[in-house]
Image (spheres, rainbow, N blue to C red):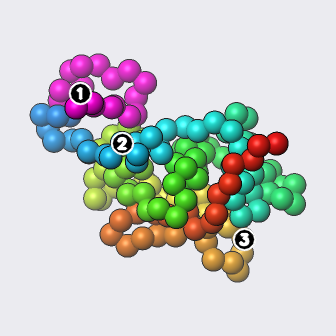
Amino acid sequence: MQIFVLGESRPDRAAIEAALRLGKFEVVEPEAAAALLPGDGRFLFAAWTLDTATRDLRHAAGRRVDLTSFEYDLLVALLRRPGRALSRAALTAALKGRAWDPFDRSIDTLVARLRKKIDTPGAPSLVRSVRGVGYVLCAPVAPDDT
């Protein structure tokens, strides 16, 4: 068995033991955990290009969008698993480094802010809510080799 700790760069042993003792942890499948780690390269989706080396998000029309660190991390997590729902718990653990609480709406707020930046008015949202699960990116994603 392997245990991967997402969140803080180097959590101490006591913090890990306390999380285990208090039940404040989540078991995430290995492929889901890998999808939540930062990626390298460029992603093309809808009319957008995200360069992970420079953290630069540009629209095909040339418009550049500034993203916060959390918005960037959320977008990369969604881009690495297009068409597959990511749970709020997995997103909270990966982005915030803590266990998800059902009353915690920070991920929902973060998704709303990201939607405002990348969605085209009048068009369906690129990030769709999946009731009882989380969020899914509803656009084909291709790596950009240029």
Please name the residue that numbered disc 2 is placed on: 30
Number of other residues with Cα within 10 Å of mark 3, as a class: few under 14, some 14 to 19, many 20 or more: few
First in residue order: circle 1 vs circle 3 = 1
Left or right of 67 on screen, residue 80: left
Please name the residue that numbered disc 3 is placed on: 120
Left or right of 25 on screen, residue 129: right
Q: CA distance from mark 2 to mark 1?
A: 19 Å
Please name the residue that numbered disc 1 is placed on: 16
Find the magenta span and give its range: 1-18
Left or right of 73 on screen, residue 12: left
Q: Position of residue 53 (x, y in %)?
A: 70, 33
Q: Position of residue 128 (x, y in %)?
A: 52, 70
Q: Position of residue 119 (x, y in %)?
A: 67, 67
Q: CA distance from mark 1 to mark 3?
A: 42 Å
Picture quadrant of residue 21: top left
Residue positioned 45% across, 40% down in the render? 34
